[in-house]
Image (spheres, helix red, strand yellow):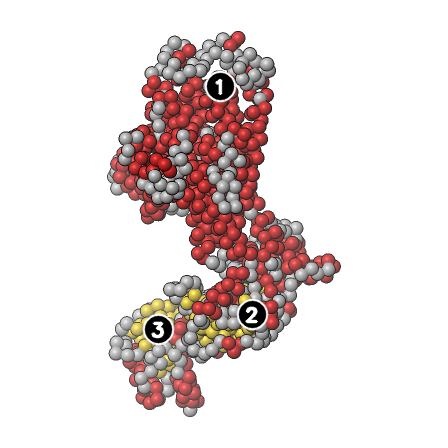
Amino acid sequence: MPTINLSGAQKNYGVNSANAVSNLDLEIRDGEFMCLLGPSGCGKTTTLRMIAGLENLSDGEIRIGERVVDSVRAGVFIPPEKREMGLVFQSYALWPHLTIERNTDFGLRLRKLPKEEREQRVEKVMQALDIAKYRDRYPSQLSGGQQQRVALARMLAVNPGVLLLDEPLSNLDARLRLEMRAELKRIHKEFKTTIVFVTHDQWEAMTLATTIAVMNEGTLQQMGTPNDIYDRPANRFVAEFVGSPPINILTFGSSASAMSRAAAAYLGERYPSLRGVGSVGIRPEAIGYATKGGDVPAGSFTGEMTVTGVLPTGGSWILELRNDNETLFLTTNALPRVETGSRVDFFAPSDALHVFDKDGQRIAEADALLRASTLN
Amino acid sequence: MALLSETAKASTVPDGAIAPTPWQRWRYRAKVASREPTTLIGILTALLFTYLIVVPIISIVLDSVRVQFGHERRLGKDFGDLTLYYLDRAFFSPVSVDLFWRPLLNTLSVALGAISLSLLIGTVLAWLISRTDMFGRRWFATALIVPYMLPAWTFALAWTTLFKNRTVGGQPGWFEAMGLTPPDWVAYGRFPIIVILALHYTPFVILLFGTALRRFDSQLEDSARILGAKRYQVAIQIILPLMRPALLSSMVLIFAKCLGEFGVPYVLGLPVKFEVLSTSLFRSIASRQTGVAGVVAASIMLIGIITLMIDARLVREARRFVTVGSKGSMNRQSRLGKYRLPATGFAALIFLLSVGLPLLTLFLSTIMKLPAQFTLDNFTLDYWIGRDLNTVALQTGILLSPDLWAAAKNTLMIVGLASLTSGILGLLVGYVVIRTPVKALSVYLRQVTFLPYLVPGIAFAAAYLSLFAVPRGPMPALYGTVTILILALIADQMPYASRAGISAMTQLGKDPEEAAQIAGAGWFRRMISIVIPIQKGALVTGVLLPFISGIKGLSLFVILAVPSTDVLTTYSLRLVDYHYTQAANAVVLIIAAIAYLGTLAAQKLTKTNLAEGLGS
């Protein structure tokens, strides 16, 4: 399947309503496992449906390779049934009046394949997804996980170049979800399909995707590998949306807390070019702590705070630190040697700081600066 | 495909925020809309219903302000000129009292009486059925709805069979025959009409009020009790205010139904010249006063529309009161204690009065030679299956009369064809309303198919007469044909059919069809393989429901049918007019049986309680 290209894609439901998707540029390359990630209502499902052709554009254009399939200005619209894609719905949308086998071979019958080949392909995909034993049952007789596999099988049977998945795991319980994640990864390898996957679950995105596109309020926030997204968030929204417990943000400015002022001073003194930035973020796992009189690594951003909570999460701990009205969270894998009420010195190395300007955009030049000083 | 050749136009999207031109937008939308027949079907059905529903209504409103045929000389104007003569005649002239004002007052008083009586009986029964430990609650829950499944004038005929006095000729009523002459006010006019309509519409109250009671969150009650309120205080301060929307709603609906009711006032009002709006309209049409008929019909429509708009408003208001709790809405029962037996007796009495007695009376009247003489030799099956009877006309029993079978055949053909058509059209409308990308089309279709609901059947029939009685354009004059009956029935049934279609399509959702689309199925393939098979049940209901209401319908037919297009209802009414009491009652019993069994069959098929959705 050639590259799918969205340029300037826009969608609004009515003249006066806000854009569900605005001015979206997106490129999905062959063989990619792309994840559209964002909070509910961010336009990710709309984007997926636009690619499938189930949603019309208000402006912009969609190309598959060099072929324009959807363009408001050129007046082109190729209907979904001619786009040769697969889509697994969040509700699975199995046809209730057809058996599992008829559900699965529906697309092949439409393509008028010879009977033998059809049976062969249905058999193969039903075996692969372990649903062959239910072939004569009706969808209502299957469990959620089984229905989900039928929905996948139905689309895989026609071997589409692109497989679109709309939150397919959200209706499954935790254990099934884990199994299906592994299943999806296997399918991606085995069938060599391009997969576009919509989710609001960051862990699903991180564990599955080769590329993540983070969306918010209809606009693309950042596109990159899972590591890019986590380690170099393009703005505060991405930084705060990805990661749990969420990143600690210290906002500078006139009404800043004592802790934030200390952070501003720390940056300003050592890196004159970073005076006047908007905020700084520190991931919880990048923060260390030392009990009173303990060692604090030189050159790191540090301060004294009170432990106000020790929350075990099984195998690791979250510590809640407070100072005036500022709260920091840090995570540690070692059994904490402190209890509620202890005074501790927290510290974070300079390369663990994510610096954002006043508009919340990442200041990329700061990265080299901060890393260099740690190496010294 | 022409679309495929338009490749490599990627550069047509310029940078910056310049929006596409309106022409580009329109062209794109047209392309999206035209790739499937959905929009085309939508436009065609919209045109069809404009012609079948909107145009007749406009036509009759115009009739009321234009010079009608035969009045040119008197008014000194040409046929079709604008005139206020008919409005003046109906509203301000000396005859206006007879034409409009007294019928209006009578309609209002009958409606008011029926509403009060049915509320009184209905609320008590609803409470007994849904919230107490009365004996046989489940049985009563179904049994007390039966009156609504039967045509209302079944009861009117039973009433005359019992109470008819010497004011009118023909076979005397049972009381008269026993030597007790009922006074006119008992036998005819306002009082019996009120009683019969009240009994007929009580199920409305039981259904609406009962549902509201069952959904009532008993935690609201408990909270008041815990704070120290007594039972009557809870009833007055908590339950009643929250039940108000349901009560008001049933009042408004009963009023709207009474407005269009024709059969009962026709049978019981005519002998004492007690006229309501619907019978006055009928008389105007029968005496070819087309202009005045237009005024009266338009007035009935206006009152109907206003009433149902009030109801829509009430329903909106009622949403503020939604008290459906998942846990608290369980069905809590009050113990009746020593009143348990009397309460059951009351429910049984109402059942006897509203179902048992009328049906038994009608049945007995068809197997007795002389009224109210209960000796063995007085019983006969001659009226059903007799041959060579010594009578002037109708010399065979009704079941052997070719007229009955002709009427039955007509009924099946006319009502059956109309129901089948409206059922299919309803599903199509539902499909278009839910699926079309052209929003205006969806809104228009939804509203235009609902319009007949606001217009009482008798006024709607008058509108049809006004439009189709004379040839217009390519359309020949349709009066007296089967076609006009079928068209009017289709239009009249569209509110139910389209509502069934829309709700079925809403329930289906987009997903199954979109999944088929993604799998590569075009429009026709999706219809045949996915939509129609899944909607089979909805289609059956959409045909069956209009069929039942069509079978017992009277007001449309009474205006549009002629002897050659007699259906069972008009046939029985004709028999009433000729005073063939036994035969008329037998035909009504047959209709009642078909309507009742049909409703039961529909309930079985759809596994729901359809009485709620049944409009007659």
Q: Quadrant of residue B96?
A: top left
Label 3 marks a residue whose chain is A
Give the structural element (helix, strand or loop) at label 1.
loop
Q: Label 3: few (<14), some or many (≥20) within 10 Å?
A: many
Indicate whether B590 appears above or below A80: above
Residue at the spot 31% in from the left edge and 88% down from the top edge: A269
Instruction: Give the residue type that dot 1 points to.
Output: Tyr
Q: Label 2: few (<14), some or many (≥20) within 10 Å?
A: many
Q: Label 1: few (<14), some or many (≥20) within 10 Å?
A: some
Q: Which residue is mark 1?
A: B580
Q: Calculate the distance from the C-alpha at mark 2 to the C-alpha at mark 3.
A: 49 Å
Q: Nearer the viewer, residue B348 or A274?
A: B348
Which disc, if any, is residue A69?
Answer: 2
Please state the horizontal and vertical placement of residue A142, each as a whole percent of the image: 58, 52
Which disc, if any, is residue A328?
Answer: 3
Give the number of the mark in front: 2 or 3. Answer: 2
Q: Quadrant of residue B263?
A: top left
Instruction: Give the residue type that dot 2 points to.
Output: Val
Residue B603 located left or right of residue A137: left
Q: Are marks 2 and 3 on the same chain?
A: yes
Discs 1, 2 touching: Cβ within 8 Å: no
Please state the horizontal and vertical placement of residue A47, each as a whole percent of the image: 49, 67
Give the number of the mark in front: 3 or 1. Answer: 1
